[in-house]
Image (cartoon, helix red, strand yellow):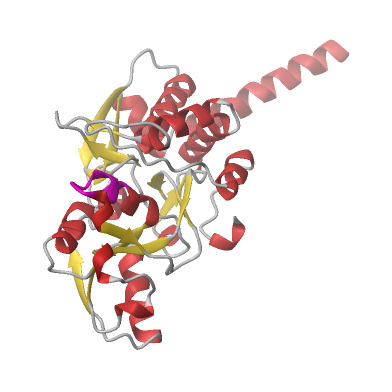
């Protein structure tokens, strides 16, 4: 009788498992399995997260993390080979290109917030940064109130420019706000005097200053427009099977000793192509985020 029951249970399990496997291979996983290709969106100027070197090769901290995700996808789908296609994106195009299926992962410096979570999903957080501004040191601009009546740039399509507009209204700053297409253009506006300051994530500003011809000519504000906000790898919304694989990959990496090595590679040592060293130690709040991986878009969660 027991043997008969075991056989019956085995048959039922077989029936139940088959649809589950078939159901799992929907969305991005199904697309990747059928095409043998995954498309990753990257940024060209978001040093050291996602950028191109002198040979136009994409590289960076976020792309290294995405490499671990690709490995996990290969293992999950039991693929011997998975081609990776790299596609440049901007702050304005990244979400539309994700939504329409052009890219499958966006590996850059994208803030995970509650507004964006209505449109896309995010991996576990891999960085926390605050929104500040950079100005020429000689200008004496250090606080947000110092910017009153000034021309201030930020990148279009970012949370940074949104917070800049909000601060302009709430503090009655009377700013002339100009939109830049990316970090390089925004910083150039400060260099050539078209803008008095450029507003962006502090770690990205640190990279721009470190890469400048004379870094001492520039200063990053003491004030910040926001609490430290989370960066995440972006993926399509409502694709739970794919998100499970992404989260499994990031959780493995973040809770292992390898994350400290990877972080040091990009933030505590010279990085190509110009040998810029951010000298930006891992903060206590980021250490906690790695030890307890989560994908919250609420800064208060960290």
Q: How many marks?
A: 0
Location of residue 231 in the rendering, given as x and y in whole percent from the top left corner:
44, 50
Tell me if residue 137 comes above or below residue 260 in the rendering.
below
Against 263, is 14 above or below?
above
* Magenta segment main secondary structure: helix
Q: Residue 211 appears at what percent x and percent y?
A: 24, 44
From the viewer's perspective, tell me whether residue 149 is left or right of residue 240. left
In the rendered image, residue 39, in percent from the top left (x then y), is placed at: 28, 34
Q: Which residue appears at 68% of the width and 25% of the height? A: 12
Residue 99 visible, this angle: yes
Name the image quarter holding residue 149: bottom left
Is 4 one of the magenta-colored residues? Answer: no
Q: Quadrant of the N terminus?
A: top right
Q: Pick the residue in front: 16 or 285.
A: 285
Q: Does the rendering let one see residue 181?
A: no
Residue nearer the viewer, 242 or 284: 284
Q: Residue at x 21, y 55 (%)?
A: 182
Vertical placement of 209 versus 107: above or below? below
Q: Is residue 211 magenta?
A: yes
Give the magenta part as a residue range: 207-214
Left or right of residue 244, residue 236 in this image: left
Q: Position of residue 172 (x, y in %)?
A: 35, 88
């Amino acid at each position: 009788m027991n043997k008969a029951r075991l056989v019956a249970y085995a048959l039922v399990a077989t029936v139940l498992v088959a649809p589950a496997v078939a159901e799992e291979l929907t969305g991005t996983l199904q697309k990747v399995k059928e095409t043998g290709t995954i498309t990753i969106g990257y940024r060209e100027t978001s040093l050291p997260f996602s950028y191109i070197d002198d040979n136009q090769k994409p590289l960076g901290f976020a792309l290294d993390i995405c490499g671990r995700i690709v490995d996990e996808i290969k293992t999950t789908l039991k693929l011997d080979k998975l081609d990776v296609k790299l596609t440049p994106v901007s702050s304005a195009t990244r979400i539309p290109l994700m939504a329409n299926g052009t890219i499958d992962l966006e590996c850059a410096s994208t803030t995970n917030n509650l507004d964006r979570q209505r449109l896309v999903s995010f991996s576990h957080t891999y960085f926390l940064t605050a929104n500040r501004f950079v100005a020429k040191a000689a200008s004496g601009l250090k606080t947000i109130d110092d910017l009153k009546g000034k021309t201030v740039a930020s990148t279009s399509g970012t949370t940074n420019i949104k917070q800049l507009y909000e601060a302009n209204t709430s503090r009655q700053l009377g700013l002339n706000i100009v939109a830049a297409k990316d970090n390089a253009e925004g910083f150039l506006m400060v260099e050539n005097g078209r803008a008095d300051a450029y507003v962006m994530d502090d770690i990205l500003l640190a990279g721009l200053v470190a890469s400048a011809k004379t870094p001492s000519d520039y200063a990053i504000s003491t004030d910040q427009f926001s609490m430290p906000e989370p960066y995440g790898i972006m993926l399509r919304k409502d694709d739970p099977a794919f998100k499970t694989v992404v989260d499994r990959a990031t959780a493995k990496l973040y809770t292992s000793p390898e994350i400290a090595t990877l972080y040091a590679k990009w933030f505590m040592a010279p990085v190509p192509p110009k040998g810029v060293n951010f000298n930006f130690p891992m903060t206590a709040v980021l250490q906690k985020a790695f030890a307890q991986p989560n994908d919250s878009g609420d800064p208060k969660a960290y």
